[in-house]
Amino acid sequence: MGVNLGNIVPKEEIKFEDLKNKVVGIDAFNALYQFLSSIRGQDGSLLQDSRGNVTSHLQGLFSRTLNLMGKGIKLVYVFDGKAPELKSQQRQARDNRKIAAEHNYNEAKDEEDLELMYKYSKQFLRLNSEMINESKELIIAMGIPVVQAPSEAEGQVAFMCKNKDIDFAASQDYDSVLFGAPKLIRNLTLSQKRKINGGRTVFTFLEFVELEKTLKELNISHNQLIVLGILSGTDFNLKGVKGIGFIIFLKIYLLTIIIN
């Protein structure tokens, strides 16, 4: 869904020690896109082998997985299946943005502007079937389970978490929470800093989001939390409800409670 509930969802800072011997389900595509975005040269070029095949995703996957396993965390990688029809509008919008970014990148390349090349190169990331299969092979070779979701990986991870097949869902998005995952981990990386839009670097920490605590503090039901997501906009309804975001909706809802 790509929904951002960060402004209203209570978060708790935890340590990697808190995840020792715990099973964490990871949205594989979410992680692989992170690697494709961050592991590249100053001119925006991705890591490649001697034959010109992209290896940024494999380098990132191998390094991060080994580091997390070294901390005693048990991992399960879940891959996206067929995208829902409701996301077709979002996929088309993303494709259009990528085409525009690639055009800007080529112009920057002609002008030998390394800064702009790096900036635009991160805006037309593409994860193809070969990269996906390579990633699965690597994960399996490392002795880690791979789960192929029928559709949305985060929906599958949330189901596994609710079913207690895993202890935590892990993703940068809050989609898993809307799907009903009881426990979400964000920033599951050893790096404590990352770049955001505009090139600014921010420091991060390992975040724990608990669905039950979220609903209790907001004094809403899970269905109402889903409504907040819809109002603010998801991959299924790009811009949400015009003029109404989840902050405004929450204020209205809380005011209704006070009046009643």
Image (spheres, rainbow, N blue to C red):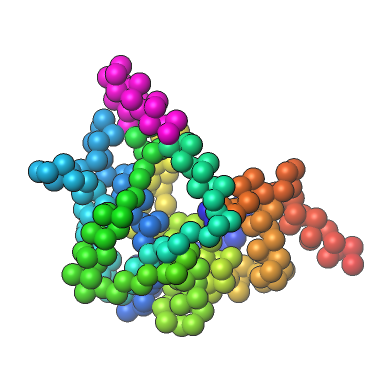
Does residue 108 show up magenta in the picture? yes
- View extreme (bottom): residue: 164
Decide if residue 169 is in sight here.
no
Decide if residue 172 is in sight here.
yes
Looking at the image, residue 187 sits to the left or right of residue 93; the answer is left
Image quadrant where residue 106 sits: top left
Residue 24 rendering spot, x and y as whole percentages:
38, 72
Q: How many marks?
A: 0
Q: Residue at x 18, y 46 (%)?
A: 53
Does residue 128 show up magenta in the picture? no
Residue 86 rendering spot, x and y as whole percentages:
58, 56
Q: Residue at x 83, y 65 (%)?
A: 257
Image quadrant where residue 228 sits: bottom right
Q: Residue at x 42, y 69 (%)?
A: 149
- View extreme (top): residue: 111
Residue 145 rendering spot, x and y as whole percentages:
29, 74
- Magenta: main secondary structure: helix
Image quadrant where residue 221 sits: bottom right
Q: In the rendered structure, which segment of residues is drawn in magenta?
A: 99-118
* Up/down of 103 relative to 141, above or below: above
Image quarter (top left, top right, bottom left or bottom right) of the N terminus: bottom right
- View extreme (right): residue: 260
In depth, the one of 211 and 243 nearer the eye is 243
Q: Residue at x 62, y 67 (%)?
A: 214
